[in-house]
Image (cartoon, rainbow, N blue to C red):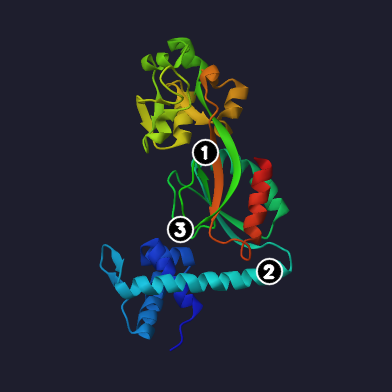
Amino acid sequence: MPIHSDDLRIFIAVVDCGSLSAAAEQLEQTTSGVSRALSRLEQKLASSLLLRTTRRMELTEEGRLFLEKARAIVSAMEEAEECIRIRHQKPSGRLRVDASPPFMLHCIVPNIDEFRRSYPDIALELTSNDQNIDLLERRTDIAIRHGTLQDSNLHARRLSASPLRLLASPAYLQLHGSPANPEDLLRHQLLGFTQTELLNTWPLRHQHGDSLPVTPTLLANSGETLRQLALHGQGIVCLADFMTQADVAAGRLVRILDDCNNGYQQQIHAVYYRNTQLSRRISCFLDFLQQKL
């Protein structure tokens, strides 16, 4: 019996979503319909693709092999479809974009209205994650990443670079005073990240080096959470300009120790799998975003 593209998409959705019900919701089908489709696919292949229990499901060895091929086939079909659209020079279709919550809120969302008016046939789907995601697993076309990129088979495009600065609210500085030098930070409340030590190394020149590892007194896993904590007078924070420059301009946050800043700039890249043929809508979005940044 022939296998249809819908069979592949349903199987991929079940794996990516982790359950039949979640896949059914994503595909706008019934859970029973998705279950029957998956069973038909396994019958056609004469193999079990998933081991299902009431609590979880796991890919079989055959399922892992088939998933890799299924993804490649669906990707090739989407690429072929996009080639036809490109001939008409009218970008259209769904575009899934993932970014950290601060970048999404401060750089993407304010510009979405203009983008949608410029490209009304592109259907945007926006998600936010503080951690790097697997683009294939999350069915994401573009992910915005900060800092040095790790080696990978992803295509990357540099969008911008944003200086990191130390900031605090006027209320905090009025209560605790402003540090005169990096060593003074030891007596202050410092706000930092939970994820990695690298994010808690601040770009400050001092008598022992060109950067300063700090031990935060209050931790959060989100830059936006740290921004809000700083705005509420909870301490000194080190954040990128793209998310704080409006606060500084409005006087809600004050830059401190700028004369000790080593000038480090956080690189901002977009990463994606498809390069040219399928990426008419990807290139439109990145061209637009890079111009805004």
Residue at horizontal 42 percent and vertical 34 percent from the top: 199
Marks 3 and 2: CB-CB under 8 Å?
A: no
Rounded to the nearest angstrom, the CA distance separating label 1 from label 2 is: 33 Å
**To which residue does mark 1 refer?**
102
Q: What element carries label 3?
A: loop
Q: Give the percent coordinates (x, y) of residue 204.
A: 47, 23
Q: Which of marks 1 and 3 is nearer the N terminus?
A: 1
Which residue is at 39% across, 16% downward?
Answer: 188
Specify the farthest residue to the bottom. 1
Q: Which mark is residue 124?
A: none
In space, the residues marked 1 and 3 are separated at their CA atoms by 20 Å
Disc 1 to disc 3: CB gap under 8 Å: no
The amino acid type of the residue labelled 2 equals: Arg
Q: Nearer the viewer, residue 241 or 180?
A: 180
Tell me the residue that label 2 is attached to.
Answer: 85
N-terminal of the pair, mark 3 or mark 2, is: 2
Coordinates of residue 191 in the picture (x, y in percent): 41, 26
Question: Which residue is at a point 59% across and 20% down the rendered structure image?
Answer: 251
Q: Position of residue 147 (x, y in %)?
A: 49, 40
The amino acid pointed to by label 1 is: Pro
The quadrant of the image that shows the C terminus is top right
For label 2, the SS is helix
Instruction: Classify mark 2: residues with Cα within 10 Å, few (<14), some (14-19) or many (20+).
Output: some
Q: Residues within 10 Å of mark 1 (few under 14, many from 20)?
A: many
Above/below status of 136 relative to 196: below
Please tell me whether residue 28 is drawn above or below residue 185 in the rendered image: below
Q: Quadrant of the N terminus?
A: bottom left
Residue 167: give x, y in percent of width and height.
50, 22
- Local SS, label 1: helix
Q: Mark 3 points at which residue?
A: 138
140 versus 13 height, above or below:
above
